[in-house]
């Protein structure tokens, strides 16, 4: 039983089953931790060895960074230590969510229908806020914003747009049928219509998909708390998994829904304040475009007055009608 639906008097929507969330927390934690190990600058061993030969030492070399050793760009400025107020604020918000989640244990009253689908009693405004809160998790705030900044608006917007469309389609075509079936989880629906084998396949599919989502959230939690508390990423991820595991196991969907409401209010308020702060503190002197690396294709062409001309780009040997990195000038070795 993997995905459940929370149902109010006038609504029905999908979410992750509390039991599955607990399982996914364990799996995601174990699968996330190895990714924190320091890797080489380039995943391609041949390219990495080439730049190590240029530098004369393993990269990133001592006192340097991958950006400088590979691309010739100045290393990022060290991030300053946060003030104690940030750590205290994060700790208070976590404690509030934790206590709310634990308190819902007394609402469940040992009944499975309360644990899995909150007794089908959640009002529409709670369901709406719970769904909205899903779109401002650490995956969205850190990951989607980062994708939009690095590559383009729609690279980061594709997930929230897809999520919104899926919820609309679910409400129009599926919610009524799900409500009438009075099942506890998404695989239950498939089991009633297609049998046990299909139920198991749907369960495995949803486990895999939510595992990736949860791993991203654990990394986001770890990035924030490790920074404001001065602890390792590994410790931060274990703390995140432990907190969410405890309050989810205590209150099931009740705990998920009501903590989502509080976290959503905090998240929306933070996003608004952060947006105004970024606008008010905008720095006009942004770093210059990247110089690139051998075989790098610039986004413009010779004579356009852009990045290609800035770094004396040359016609590409492989890509027709394109401007490439000038190896003879910038990397003659």
Image (cartoon, rainbow, N blue to C red):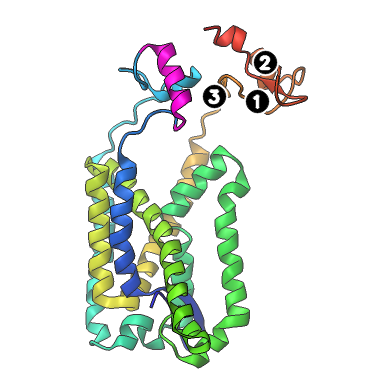
Check whether the beta carbons of the residues at disc 3 and disc 1 lie within 8 A of each other: no
Foreground residue, 86 or 247? 247
- Residue picked out by circle 3: 285
Asked whether 201 or 301 is in front, the reply is 201
- Residue 222: horizontal and vertical position, in percent? 30, 48
Q: Is residue 258 above or below residue 228?
A: below
Kindly tell me whether residue 74 is visible in this rendering: no
Residue 282's spot in the image, x, y percent? 52, 34
**Which residue is tagged 2?**
313
Q: Nearer the viewer, mark 3 or mark 1?
A: 1
In magenta, the rendered stretch is 43-56
Indicate yes or no whether the magenta region holds residue 298.
no
Q: Is residue 53 above or below residue 249?
A: above
- Residue 297, which numbered label? 1
Q: Which image quarter: residue 36?
A: top left
In terms of secondary structure, where does tag 2 sit?
A: loop
SS assignment for the magenta stretch, majority? helix
- Disc nearer the start of the sequence (3/2): 3
User: What residue appears at the point 28 percent right and 71 percent down from the top-left corner?
Assistant: 248
Classify 10 Å Cα crowding around label 3: few (below 14), some (14-19), many (20 and above): few
């Amino acid at each position: 039983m993997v995905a459940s639906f929370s149902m109010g008097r006038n609504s029905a929507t999908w979410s992750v089953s509390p039991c599955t969330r607990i399982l996914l927390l364990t799996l995601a934690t174990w699968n996330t931790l190895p990714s924190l190990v320091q890797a080489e600058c380039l995943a391609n061993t041949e390219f990495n060895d080439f730049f190590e030969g240029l530098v004369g030492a393993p990269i990133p070399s001592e006192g340097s960074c991958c950006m400088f050793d590979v691309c010739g760009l100045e290393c990022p400025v060290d991030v300053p230590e946060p003030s104690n107020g940030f750590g205290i604020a994060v700790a208070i918000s976590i404690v509030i969510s934790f206590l709310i989640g634990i308190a819902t244990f007394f609402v469940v009253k040992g009944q499975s229908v309360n644990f899995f689908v909150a007794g089908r009693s959640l009002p529409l405004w709670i369901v709406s806020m719970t769904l909205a809160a899903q779109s401002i998790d650490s995956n969205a705030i850190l990951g989607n914003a980062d994708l939009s900044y690095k590559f383009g608006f729609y690279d980061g917007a594709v997930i929230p747009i897809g999520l919104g469309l899926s919820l609309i389609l679910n409400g129009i075509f599926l919610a009524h049928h799900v409500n009438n079936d009075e099942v506890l989880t998404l695989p239950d629906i498939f089991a009633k219509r297609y049998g046990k084998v299909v139920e198991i396949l749907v369960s495995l599919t949803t486990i895999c998909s939510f595992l990736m989502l949860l791993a991203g959230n654990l990394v986001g939690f770890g990035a924030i708390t490790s920074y404001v508390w001065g602890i390792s990423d590994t410790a931060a991820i274990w703390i995140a998994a432990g907190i969410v595991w405890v309050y989810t196991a205590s209150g099931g969907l009740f705990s998920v829904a009501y903590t989502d409401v509080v976290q959503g209010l905090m998240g929306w308020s933070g996003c608004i304040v952060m947006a105004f702060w970024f606008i008010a503190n905008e720095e006009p002197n942004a770093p210059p475009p990247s110089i690139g690396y051998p075989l790098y294709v610039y986004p413009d062409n010779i004579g356009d007055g852009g990045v290609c001309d800035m770094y004396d780009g040359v016609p590409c040997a492989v890509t027709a009608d394109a401007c490439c990195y000038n190896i003879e000038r910038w990397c003659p070795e």
